[in-house]
Image (cartoon, grey):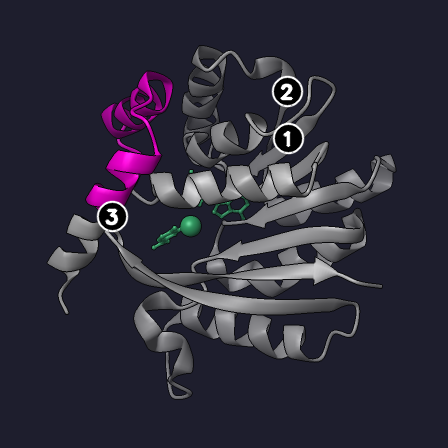
Amino acid sequence: MSEETWAAVEKYVDGLLIPSDPVLEAAVAASEAAGLPDIAVTSSQGKLLYLLARLQRARRILEVGTLGGYSTIWLARALPEDGSVVTIESEKQHCEVARVNVERADLSALVEFREGKALDVLPELAAEGLEPFDLVFIDADKENTEAYFRWALRLSRVGAAILVDNVIRQGKVAEPETDDAPVEGMRRFFEMLAAEPRVTATTIQTVGRKGYDGFTLAMVVG
Ligand code: SAH
Ligand code: DHB
Ligand code: MG
């Protein structure tokens, strides 16, 4: 089975289940025009984020890795009027593109942008003593995923969902002898997860237009 088939199936099912959406298409176009990398979640993954946030009845969402705000828009659309997404991004230019995209989506009132390195911003959030998060989406530099997950755990309520993107890396995660830093980061993450009694988790491999990867869904249980 080929990548061509994955892309064709994605086009077929998304064409039926995910109506074309001028605001999201504009966000993709503006991100591309600004030269941002083409690594946002796909529309089917974005819709999964949206559905999980709704199933969770999430009011407080944390995102690590904003890029152009594509996933931020999907998440913010799942929120009630008094909800919020706090989204962390270290690249000033990405933040600027994301602000415009979120404004165009008429979601600025629900999104709080935190510009800075996540390992600097996350301790600030903890010090601010905010209400705990109901859902966290971790999608930044893969090397620090374990640390981001630990912060997510600290900042979440029992019952919260923590999603981690790009955990499979074309299957390289199962190769012990890797010298790929992002893959090593994901292996450290999985080893931590396996030993962490406060969460229960599963990992789903995905294929599609953007190749072969996967995500982990964890639930905070204690
Ligand atoms: N969630 C986005 C994609 C994020 S891509 C979407 O699906 O639409 C990963 C982002 O993480 C990039 O914009 C990158 O600049 C950012 N990033 C990388 N290292 C970071 C760090 N240390 N702190 C915060 N953001 C970081
Ligand atoms: C990369 C990062 C992502 O968040 C993603 O979804 C795909 C690829 C990357 O850094 O290669
Ligand atoms: Mg990603």
Of badges 1 and 3, nearer the viewer stands 3
Q: What element carries label 1?
A: strand
- Magenta span main SS: helix
Furthest-bottom residue in this view: 177
Q: Residue at x 71, y 80 (%)?
A: 195
Whether 114 is drawn above or below 198: the answer is: above
Q: What residue type is labelled 2?
A: Leu
**On the rendered image, what quadrant is the N terminus found in?**
bottom left
Magenta span contains residue 16: yes
Distance from Cα at disc 2 to Cα at disc 3: 30 Å
The x and y percentages for residue 83 are 71, 25
Label at residue 10: 3
Distance from Cα at disc 1 to Cα at disc 3: 28 Å
The x and y percentages for residue 141 are 48, 54
Q: Which amino acid does label 3 sit on?
A: Glu
Whether 27 is drawn above or below 188: the answer is: above
Q: What is the magenta range?
A: 10-37
The one nearer the camera, 136 or 151, is 136
Residue 65 in sight here: no
Q: Is mark 3 on a helix, strand or loop?
A: helix
Taking 3 as reference, is 137 left or right? right
Question: Which residue matches tag 2?
Answer: 110
Distance from Cα at disc 2 to Cα at disc 1: 6 Å
